[in-house]
Image (tube, grey):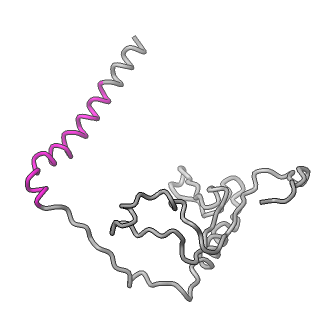
Amino acid sequence: MLSYEPPIDQFKKKDLPIGVLVEGVFKSIYANRMTPNMYTSGEINYKDVSKETMQLFIADGDLIRNRYNPESNEFYALGMDKYTQQVYGNKDFFLNAVNYMLDESGLILSNTKSFKIRLLNREFIAQNRLMLQLLNTAVPIAIVVIFGLVFGLIRRRKYS
């Protein structure tokens, strides 16, 4: 990507968060990896190339991390330094970035979207009711009991 190597002496600062917003049409990472039946399946709406879109990449996930104060049982404000109590512009940065990427003029209202509720298979439930009830109640209890016994044996051997 770079035609020349950047001088190392320009990189004196460390631990700087870096981000980039890219715009355009992007090729799918799944191109040439899909099986033929996945292309013809009606369940997957696969596209080799995306629509015109924007993506924001931030090198440091702590930019959007809210720290927690266990003493007051509250979260600090986004971008607040818990030691100096200074609030940085993290919240404004993300709000501006999201507003820019959403492009308010092209925003689709969420109440116009529709989704299909996928119901459970009633016949399968009726035929296998007892097995499903045992699976959902007895198996988790058995797993907890087995882990308890195993850890108890390990502790007994370790401290005996």
Question: Relative to residue 154, is residue 103 depicted above or below?
Answer: below
Image location (x, y in percent) of residue 124: 13, 56
Residue 97 shown left or right of residue 13 in the figure: left
Find out whether residue 136 is within the magenta segment. yes
Residue 4: name its quadrant: bottom right
The C terminus - image quarter: top left
From the viewer's side, name the closer residue of 47 and 96: 47
Residue at the spot x=19%, y=44% of the render?
A: 135
Q: Which residues are magenta?
A: 123-149
Position in image of residue 56 (x %, y %): 63, 67
Q: On the rendered structure, is 69 left or right of 44?
A: right
Q: Position of residue 80 (x, y in %)?
A: 66, 61
Relative to the observer, which residue lies in front, 28 or 56? 28
Count of numbered circles on the image? 0
* Residue sitting at x 79%, y 50%: 14
Residue at the left extreme of this rendering: 127
Q: Is residue 39 one of those drawn in magenta?
A: no
Please say if 6 is above or below 141: below
Residue at left offset 72%, top offset 56%:
84
Q: Main secondary structure of the magenta part?
A: helix
Which residue is at the front of the view, 142 or 89?
Answer: 142
State which quadrant residue 75 falls in: bottom right
> Does residue 31 appear to the left or right of 39 in the view shown?
right
